[in-house]
Amino acid sequence: IFKQGKKGIVTWVEFRFFVDLPAGSTALMQSRAEEVLALRASKGMVLNESDHDTWSCGSFFTNPIVSDSFARTLPLDAPQWPTVEDDGKTVKLSAAWLIEQAGVHKGFSLPRSQAAISSKHALAITNRGTATANEVAELARYVQLQVSNKFGITLVPEPNLIGF
């Protein structure tokens, strides 16, 4: 909510879990947590000091929400999900799929840049060792341009970019 211009302070959160388990059971939660961690690690989203693919701020772009009519103009294999509103008028697209279909593949980097697209996940911009903030911003702008040119969609960065 905060990146959408809404102001406020979160003072209360309620979680509802729909799992048919006896009260106090933790075995399932622990195994699910381990599965999620393993999946995130396979995509380079868990820090490993010896793996440059994990030197990132995670997913760099948000998955765009577009009109259902626009989504129907995309190839049939374009991943799409209902939005929170689930009103049938909007769908969420996979930013990673858009990036790869726009020709920016895993492992891509601009010439002489230490910033690169992760070799494990097209949505992560990584630091190959000595990338500067400018190199990360340049690569992000390049990705945005390629996706915009191919699909007419402007990807929105997830991290707050200060000074760019």
Image: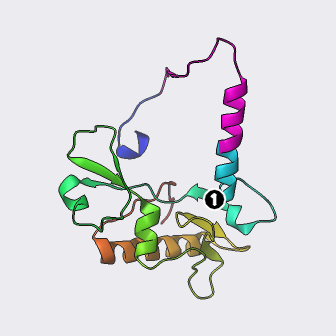
- The verdict on residue 128 being magenta is no
- Give whichever of 40, 8 is nearer the camera: 40
Residue 106 percent coordinates (x, y): 57, 73
In this rendering, the answer to whether 101 lies above or below 80 is below
Quarter of the N terminus within the rendering:
top left
- Residue at image position (81%, 65%) is 50
The type of residue carrying mark 1 is Lys
- Give whichever of 65, 156 is nearer the camera: 65
- Give whichever of 90, 38 is nearer the camera: 38
Residue 157 percent coordinates (x, y): 45, 59
- The verdict on residue 14 being magenta is yes
Q: Secondary structure at mark 1?
A: loop
Quick one: label 1, few (<14), some, or many (20+) residues within 10 Å? Answer: some
Q: Is residue 35 left or right of residue 68?
A: right
Q: Main secondary structure of the magenta part?
A: loop
- Residue at image position (64%, 72%) is 132
Examine the image and state in which quarter residue 121 appears.
bottom right
Region rendered in magenta:
10-35
Q: Is residue 109 left or right of residue 65?
A: right
Residue 49 percent coordinates (x, y): 80, 61
Q: How is the image coloured?
A: rainbow
- Residue at image position (27%, 55%) is 66
Q: Dot 1 corresponds to which residue?
A: 43
Examine the image and state in which quarter residue 20 appears.
top right
Q: Residue furthest right?
A: 50
